[in-house]
Image: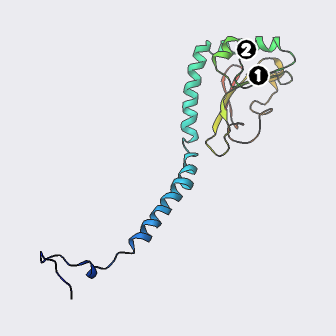
Amino acid sequence: MAQLSTLGCIASMEDSTPSRSSLPRLLLLIAIAFFIFFFILPSCLTWWPPASVERREQRAKFMERVQAAGGWDAIRRDCIAFAAQNTNGFYSHFRDTNGLPAAIVALKPMIVEYVPPTGCMRIRIFGMHSTGGHSTPYFGLEVDTSTNSVSYNHGSGYDNGGVIGNHHSVAEKVAEGIYELY
């Protein structure tokens, strides 16, 4: 029989049933939270932002840079003059803008390449592959600098491989002799 305390309404501890099922349930919830936090959530972070949202933001930043450079005509004029000075070709290292014309520097390029046989200058503005993280999609320009580029298929050629951030799949004409790559 249950013994009552002196107050007459409190049952003694020997009569209450121990609640052992709450400890395994708590441990299971901790294990599930751990799994979500360390395995599911990081993989979801590599999907955000979607490419369409990121592309729109890249294009808006890029158009501001084009205006700061003096417009499409100034960019093409400087690319043609630069190609005429570098008849053996040119490759700038990552973010190296030394010796580049002012209109190209205003674009804040990551890499600038000029290959004389194609007659095109490729300017990489955005794009970075990240192993195990979010890769920034490729966005850049190809500018015709000579008559060699008339037969050149824009958007093909000398890109750096097939991973996100290092390659493109679309080339659209945005001005006379200038193609946007993404």
> Closest to the observer: 95 or 159?
95
Q: Nearer the viewer, residue 67 or 173?
A: 67
Q: Residue at x 82, y 12 (%)?
A: 84
Label of residue 100 in the image: 2
Q: Residue at left 63%, top 16%?
A: 106
Q: Residue furthest left?
A: 7
Q: What is the CA distance from the residue labelled 2 to the residue labelled 1?
A: 9 Å
Q: Earlier in the sequence, mark 2 or mark 1?
A: 1
At label 1, the amino acid type is Ser
Above-or-below relation of 37 to 60? below
Give the residue at mark 1: 92
Q: Are marks 2 and 1 in contact (CB under 8 Å)?
A: yes
The image shows residue 95 at horizontal and vertical percentages of 69, 23
Please state the horizontal and vertical placement of residue 137, each as a whole percent of the image: 64, 36
- For badge 2, the amino acid type reads Leu
Task: Give residue 134's quadrant in the image.
Answer: top right
Q: Nearer the viewer, residue 13 or 55?
A: 13
Query: Does the rendering let one see residue 182?
Result: no
